[in-house]
Image: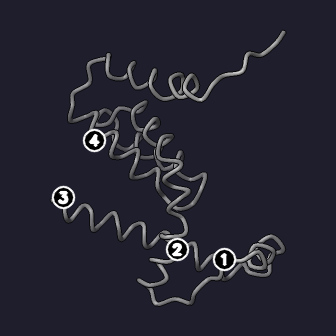
């Protein structure tokens, strides 16, 4: 049985547009839809890859009926490229915020990470990235309030 090749637009329509249309047809309130989308994107740009789905699950369980779970998860999925592109800026901004040492992003640093020689530096850089993301979110919330 041959598997037909799917074009980029067909994949985009199937994975993004169709689920979004189904969500919009269900008649959610605009406030709930906007809140759920903002929550999914905000949690989706957390700078530790693989943790965002867990964070969204915790937020959905905590907020219950205040947010729409499929919208939160779809926004989280859509924010993945943004998350990956913001890891290095969050890392650098966290270094500036905390005054910490500069973590070199070289192939040698990657080798040290895989061999376990740079564990302290990696953990420190992750802490810097997370703290900068939290600081950015707090600044955004204060600006919106």
Asked which secondary structure carries label 3, the reply is: helix
Q: Residue furthest top?
A: 1
Asked which secondary structure carries label 4, the reply is: helix
Up the image or down, 3 lies above or below 33; here it is: above
- N-terminal of the pair, mark 1 or mark 2, is 2
Q: Point out residue 89 in the picture as x, y percentages from the top left corner.
A: 49, 70
- N-terminal of the pair, mark 2 or mark 4, is 4
Q: Nearer the viewer, mark 1 or mark 2?
A: 1
Reading the image, the residue beneath label 4 is 35
At x 31%, y 32%, the residue is 65
- N-terminal of the pair, mark 1 or mark 3, is 1
- N-terminal of the pair, mark 4 or mark 1, is 4
Residue 113 vs residue 25: left or right?
A: right
Q: Quadrant of the N terminus?
A: top right
Q: Are marks 1 and 2 in contact (CB under 8 Å)?
A: yes
At x 56%, y 90%, the residue is 101
Reading the image, the residue beneath label 3 is 144
Q: Point out residue 95 in the picture as x, y percentages from the top left corner.
A: 49, 83
Q: Are marks 2 and 4 in contact (CB under 8 Å)?
A: no
Reading the image, the residue beneath label 2 is 91
What numbered label is drawn on residue 69? none
At x 38%, y 20%, the residue is 21
Q: Nearer the viewer, mark 2 or mark 4?
A: 2
- N-terminal of the pair, mark 4 or mark 3, is 4
Query: Alpha-carbon neighbours of circle 2 within 10 Å: few (<14), some, or many (≥20)?
Result: many
- For the residues labelled 2 and 3, the Cα–Cα distance comes to 24 Å
Reading the image, the residue beneath label 1 is 105
């Amino acid at each position: 049985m041959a598997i037909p090749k799917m074009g980029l637009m067909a994949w985009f329509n199937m994975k993004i547009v169709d689920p979004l249309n189904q969500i919009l047809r269900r008649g959610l309130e605009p406030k709930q839809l906007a809140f759920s989308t903002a929550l999914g994107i905000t949690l989706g740009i957390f700078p530790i890859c693989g943790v965002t789905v867990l964070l969204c699950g915790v937020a959905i369980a905590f907020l219950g009926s205040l947010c729409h779970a499929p919208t939160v998860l779809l926004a989280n999925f859509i924010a993945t490229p943004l998350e990956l592109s913001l890891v290095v800026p969050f890392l650098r901004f966290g270094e500036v915020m905390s005054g910490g040492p500069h973590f070199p992003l070289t192939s040698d640093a990657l080798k040290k990470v895989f061999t376990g020689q740079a564990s302290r530096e990696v953990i420190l850089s992750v802490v810097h990235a997370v703290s900068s993301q939290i600081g950015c979110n707090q600044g955004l919330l204060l600006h919106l309030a």
